[in-house]
Image (cartoon, rainbow, N blue to C red):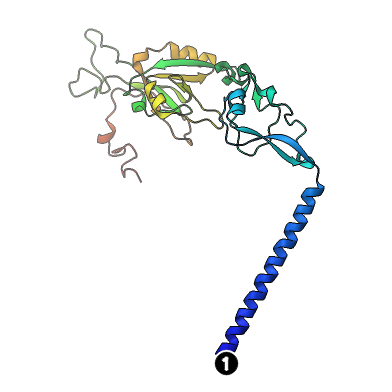
Amino acid sequence: MSSRRTLILIAAIAVGAIAAFALFNYVKGIEDRANEQAERVPVYKVALDIPKGTPGEQASSSELIVRSEIPREFLPANATANIETIEGRVALNDLSANQVLVEGMFVDPASALITFSERLTDGNVTMTISVDQVRGVGGLLVPGDEVNIMITSAPAELAEGEAPPEGAGPNEDQAIYTQPARYLYQQVPILAIGRNFVPQPGETVDPEAVAAGAGTITFIVPPDAAQRIASVDPGSIYLSLVPPDFEAVPMPPLPLDEILPGEDGVRLTPFGPAGKE
């Protein structure tokens, strides 16, 4: 009985395999006939990925672009008919393998360049400052980040015979805050660090290059904001990095005679008496 079942099982598997093979050949035959009936036309295709800025001559001589054929119904209206038209030009963007070469993929080198001024919109201008790592968030900033700009200044000296404010400090002759900081602007976007600017779609930031130029930061701001930033002593500027969901709120000047946060029982930590949750 067991042998009979085994034979039946083997026969069923064989019949299934034959049916699958027949179906595969049938479908393949239909596809072959369809391709034979479709008119095929010559095109140039991207054989391997081509980086942005690659010269056309290099792409052609290195066989990054090759001759191929596709059905006429898939032929783009602006397909490149003559490979010589890309000579003296460069790839405008990164090109992926198997793309059909069309007009506009390779352009004059001047057209491929984006000037720095073209990145400025809505009447904004640039403003560049120089900061050290202590005042510039430890060199951790990258183009595209937003920062708050604080400025510091020494408190005014007391006039001769003038009494210090109550609670002015432990020595009663100086303010608690020896260089009180005030917020100049909040959420200031960084356009560039050194010569590395906010990447365009498809571009990446080189961390090493950014680190090398970390001391020079260029903001994109309205003209009046640039005027105010330029009017501040560069040595008094401190930057603080803010998160993407940061919301700017007014921050009043520090009262020089206030009790320090760690002593008032309310603000024992930067996040409140309970600490960071």
Q: Report the front residue among 207 and 50.
A: 50
In the image, residue 258 sits, relative to residue 156, either above or below, namely below
| Relative horizontal placement of residue 35, taking residue 122 as reference (left or right) | right
Query: What residue is drawn where x is 52% and y is 28%?
Result: 199
Give the image quarter of residue 88: top right
Task: Report the amino acid beneath label 1.
Answer: Met
Point out residue 206 in the picture as x, y percentages from the top left corner. 44, 28
Query: What residue is drawn where x is 72% and y is 66%?
Result: 22
| Relative horizontal placement of residue 228, taking residue 255 as reference (left or right) | right
Q: Report the front residue among 227 and 126.
A: 126
Query: What residue is drawn where x is 25% and y is 8%?
Result: 159
Give the image quarter of residue 212: top left
- Outermost residue toward the top in this view: 160
Point out residue 93 in the picture as x, y percentages from the top left corner. 60, 29
Mark 1 surroundings: few (<14), some (14-19) or many (≥20) residues within 10 A: few
Question: Dot 1 lies on which element?
Answer: loop
Point out residue 190 in the picture as x, y percentages from the top left corner. 47, 24
In the image, residue 82 sits, relative to residue 227, either above or below, namely below
Point out residue 215 in the picture as x, y percentages from the top left corner. 37, 19
Q: Report the front residue among 24 and 152.
A: 24
Report the residue marked by disc 1. Answer: 1
In the image, residue 227 sits, relative to residue 56, either above or below, namely above
